[in-house]
Amino acid sequence: MDNNMKKDLENKAREVRRGIVTAVHSAKSGHPGGSLSAADIMTYLYFEEMNIDPKDPKNANRDRFVLSKGHIAPALYSVLSHRGYFPTSDLTTLRHTGSYLQGHPDMKHIPGVDMSSGSLGQGLSAAVGMALAAKLDNKDYRVYAMCGDGEIEEGQIWEASMFASFRGLDNLCVIVDNNNLQIDGAIDEVCSPYPIPEKFAAFGFNVIEINGHDFDEIEAAFKKARETKGKPTAIIAKTTKGKGVSFMENQCGWHGKAPNDEEFETALKDLEVSE
């Protein structure tokens, strides 16, 4: 990836992060930590990787994205708005009465959302169904699903993974946002899913491990996923919860808490876009 492209993506990701903290601050509730850790990968997906068109969000041949860990909806809403699906100014209506941007993604009311999600563990099954449908219909669209590392403690994740491998769904790419923290603490202290790469490999996946904040590694991983035939891919992305906001990074308490006015101003300064 050339330096200009990388710089552009880094700035886009900062804008996405600013949208996240703006939305959560306005709502006075929400989930900033995991939204911030996922922002780089989601920025790359929507601005570089996926075949999508904000002017035609229901195109039958579009690539699909399922946010299995639906509570990080602020990240999805921010990237969708910056990609042009709806005005960025609407981010300040997050979780407000009457707003279409509620606490979890809603495919019936939000342009660009391919699957309603929020009940942890279920989103990957929906993504597997979409990938199977593409195969049965002889379509070449791809399906991307983002899971949390705490979420993969759910058994349904592994049922879906077993099926995806058995059916050779090489059009499916699972991304695990491995920030090592869930609502109750470190994942290895709550109910450890480690070792994550070996588990997906045992279920028949092509497994790629990356730094989820390095755009060169992100680009290479998605390229390898597209080139892999006969099996689904799992990208295990090491990330930092609260990435980009100094007082939120690696702090479990920011899993589901909104910044106050002073903290919000600090966050915006942390996330100023460089020239």
Image (cartoon, rainbow, N blue to C red):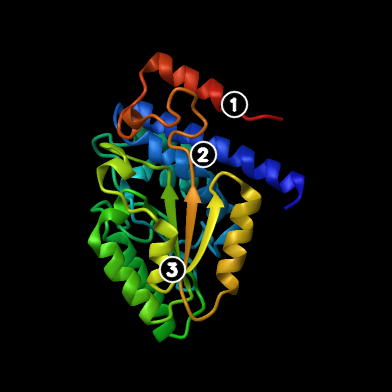
In the drawing, what numbered circle is on residue 272? 1
Left or right, 86 with respect to 270, comes to left
Category of crowding for the residue at label 1, using alpha-carbon neighbours closer than 10 angstroms: few (below 14), some (14–19), many (at least 20) = some
Toward the top, the furthest residue is 262
Category of crowding for the residue at label 2, using alpha-carbon neighbours closer than 10 angstroms: few (below 14), some (14–19), many (at least 20) = many
* Foreground residue among 267 and 28: 267
Q: Secondary structure at mark 3?
A: helix
* Foreground residue among 155 and 257: 155
Category of crowding for the residue at label 3, using alpha-carbon neighbours closer than 10 angstroms: few (below 14), some (14–19), many (at least 20) = some
Left or right, 58 with respect to 155, comes to right
First in sequence, mark 2 or 3: give its number: 2
Q: CA distance from mark 1 to mark 2?
A: 11 Å
Q: Is residue 140 above or below residue 118?
A: below
Q: Is residue 264 visible?
A: yes
Instruction: Provide the residue designation for mark 3.
Output: 201
The amino acid type, in three-letter code, at marker 2 is Val
The amino acid type, in three-letter code, at marker 1 is Glu
First in sequence, mark 1 or 3: give its number: 3
Q: Secondary structure at mark 1?
A: loop
Instruction: Provide the residue designation for mark 2.
Output: 16
Q: Position of residue 226 (x, y in %)?
A: 57, 70
Q: Position of residue 117 (x, y in %)?
A: 29, 55
Q: Secondary structure at mark 2?
A: helix
Q: CA distance from mark 1 to mark 3?
A: 39 Å
Give yes or no for contact between labels 1 and 2 (Cβ–Cβ under 8 Å): no
Q: Is residue 102 visible?
A: no
Q: Position of residue 64 (x, y in %)?
A: 44, 65
Residue appearing at x 42%, y 32% in the figure: 250
In the drawing, what numbered circle is on residue 12? none
